[in-house]
Amino acid sequence: VDKQHCVSAIGGKLDDELFFEFSTITPNVLQFLPCGTVSTLKPICFLLFDQKIDTNRILEHLCVMSSDKHEISSNELQLVDEVTAKKEFKSYIDATEGNHQKYVAFTFKNDLLKATQYTIQLPAGCPSAEGPL
């Protein structure tokens, strides 16, 4: 804070300039579903984070990779509407107060390949609604 331009309502000024820094942590995934084998080619995926997130920003950063190294781009993913997400993952969302803004639920616009393993990745430093911009 520039001491010359920081004046109180009664005309007082700072004796010295004020400078401080702070940072926030990036989000961590607490829960991911589904795990193991799924019986549909369009599963609904659910990621629960330890802080509030911007679902659209998270979706932009998601990387889905098949076992044959084919990457499914984020524009091939689709957010699941809130009603469906709350129905499918109610126990996880309701487990802790505030979880309603800490998850992303998505599915795939196209069917996944049969008998294929997929890995979902988020890059380090992925943005949240609370962490670094």
Image (cartoon, helix red, strand yellow):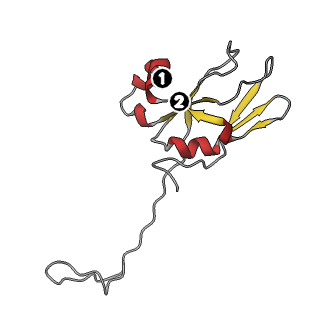
User: Marks 2/1: CA distance?
Assistant: 7 Å
Check the image and name the residue furthest to the right. 68
Check the image and name the residue furthest to the left. 10
Image quadrant where residue 10 sits: bottom left
Q: How many residues crowd mark 2 within 10 Å: few (<14), some (14–19), many (20+)?
A: some
Image quadrant where residue 58 sits: top right
Check the image and name the residue furthest to the top. 39
| 79 with respect to 83 (left or right) | right
Q: Which residue is mark 2?
A: 80
Instruction: Note whether 128 is above or below 64 in the view shown.
Output: below
Q: Residue 90's x, y, as percent?
A: 44, 20
**Residue positioned 36% across, 82% down in the render:** 2
Q: Secondary structure at mark 2?
A: loop
Q: Secondary structure at mark 1?
A: helix
Q: Are marks 2 and 1 in contact (CB under 8 Å)?
A: yes
Instruction: Note whether 114 is above or below 28 in the view shown.
Output: above
Q: Which residue is mark 1?
A: 84
Q: Which is more toward the observer, 96 or 13?
A: 96
Q: Residue 35's x, y, as percent?
A: 65, 19
**Residue positioned 70% across, 19% down in the render:** 41
Q: Residue 96's x, y, as percent?
A: 39, 27
**Residue positioned 51% across, 47% down in the render:** 128
Q: Which is more toward the observer, 97 or 11?
A: 97
Q: How many residues crowd mark 1 within 10 Å: few (<14), some (14–19), many (20+)?
A: few
Position of the N terminus, as image quadrant, is bottom left
Amino acid at pointer 1? Thr
**Residue positioned 50% across, 18% down in the render:** 88
Q: Which labelled disc corresponds to residue 49?
A: none
Check the image and name the residue furthest to the bottom. 4
Amino acid at pointer 2? Val
| 22 with respect to 39 (left or right) | left
